[in-house]
Image (cartoon, helix red, strand yellow):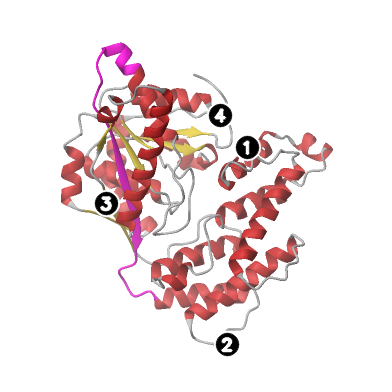
Amino acid sequence: MSDARFIPPQLNPLFTRLIQSIFYLVAYFGYKIKFVIDDRDVAQLKAISHQRVVYLPNHSNLDDGLVVFLLSARLGQLFHYIVAYEAFAGLIGKLMPMVGVYSIRRGVGDRYSIKQTLQILQQPESKLVIFPEGGCSYQNDTVIPFRTGAIELSFKAMEKLIKQEADIPDFYLVPVSLKYTYPQATDAKIAESLGGLEAALSIQPVKEDFYLRLRAISAQVLANLEAEYNVTLDLTDWNQRIEYLRKHLLDYCEEKLDITPATELPNRERIYKVQAILRSLDNTTAKQSQINYEHLYQTTVRLLNFDAIYDGYVADNPTPERFFATLDRLEREVFNIDRPKPKGLRQAVVKTATPINLKKYYQNINSDSSRQQVINNLTQEIQQQVQAYLN
């Protein structure tokens, strides 16, 4: 299996065990993360340690991969992980395959990644992590719709195993909730982040109320984006403005690349397709087509950053966690950065639902239509269980 656009796993058990042994300290001092999981959840996962398991966590933060790696260390197990191709950059990107990470190109049918996934899922006692949201939501306690791909691939792997073994094997799916909390005092950090954004946007804070200051910053960012993309609306409802802006930016990207809009797909899938096409262009092609590559790509980054945001997210439940999730998004936009600095020590709280044995479902499938219905129902059930624990 060789392709310049696919990075296979090169799991080195000795190296991975070494990294696991020190990673609690790395996470705590380097990323301000303290890993938290209940002993009952650990016991529940260790009870299926000799089975094939697919872990399905929500994806609210760019540090989620670190947290799942901490879970593997807590269990004393070796995991494989599917990660977006563009994440394999720098020294860390070169080390990632050695701990079981391999790539997937979003927005295209990545047959190399799919083939690798099926091979891993057929291995005895395999453990694989797939983020079913398909990308980062940037919201600490809500999920975006789960995709069906993880469960579809699990069923395909089971079919291959049945042909080899003439028996239906045990095969587990584990819904995983990842949630970050800030146990220490946070007002100073909120004030610091608000002040930095206000200075960058030339906003003079007129009130001490954090929420009103956050709204003023958000209003300026929204107005700046509308001005940059020549959007003129006579609307006072922020959610209508946000939704229109999202549509306008996505239409702009697809029009520039001459892509027929696949309106039946979620916006996120359409954005990934745009990014995939942009990455396939060389400088000559981009210049000949008069494509402003940098601006188009920045537009897709903005679309993903604000994909799940809505007016009222903080007001509905003004916790420090929701403040910080929103401030992180605004800092990404205003300062053009990928990973804002952690705003204090975070507890990464991991909760797992009861493992689901696919064997029980597979026995009741008697047609392609019933199989798809089972996959859809399971996807929805897992999403609901993850959201329930986040609540």
Residue 140's quadrant in the figure? bottom left
Residue 244 percent across, percent down from the top left? 66, 59
Q: Nearer the viewer, mark 1 or mark 4?
A: 4
Quick check: marks 1 and 2 in contact, CB under 8 Å?
no
In 3D space, how far apart are the residues under numbered discs 1 and 3 (Cα atoms)? 34 Å
| Amino acid type for the residue under numbered disc 4 | Gly
Residue 71's quadrant in the figure? top left
* Relative to 205, 143 lies left or right: left
* Relative to 332, 299 lies left or right: right
Residue holding disc 2: 206
- The mark that comes first in sequence, 3 or 2, is 2
Quick check: marks 1 and 4 in contact, CB under 8 Å?
no
User: How busy is the neighbourhood of tag 3: few (under 14 within 10 Å), some, or many (20 plus)?
Assistant: many
Q: Relative to the observer, which residue lies in front, 89 or 38?
A: 38
Residue holding disc 4: 109
Residue 284 percent across, percent down from the top left? 79, 35
Residue holding disc 3: 351
Q: Relative to the observer, which residue lies in front, 63 or 391?
A: 391
Residue at image point 81% right, 40% down: 287
Magenta residues, start to end: 160-186
Residue holding disc 1: 276
- The mark that comes first in sequence, 2 or 4, is 4
Residue 315 seen from this side:
yes
Residue 10 seen from this side:
no
In 3D space, how far apart are the residues under numbered discs 3 and 2 (Cα atoms)? 41 Å
In 3D space, how far apart are the residues under numbered discs 1 and 4 (Cα atoms)? 11 Å
| Amino acid type for the residue under numbered disc 1 | Ala
As drawn, 125 above or below 213? above
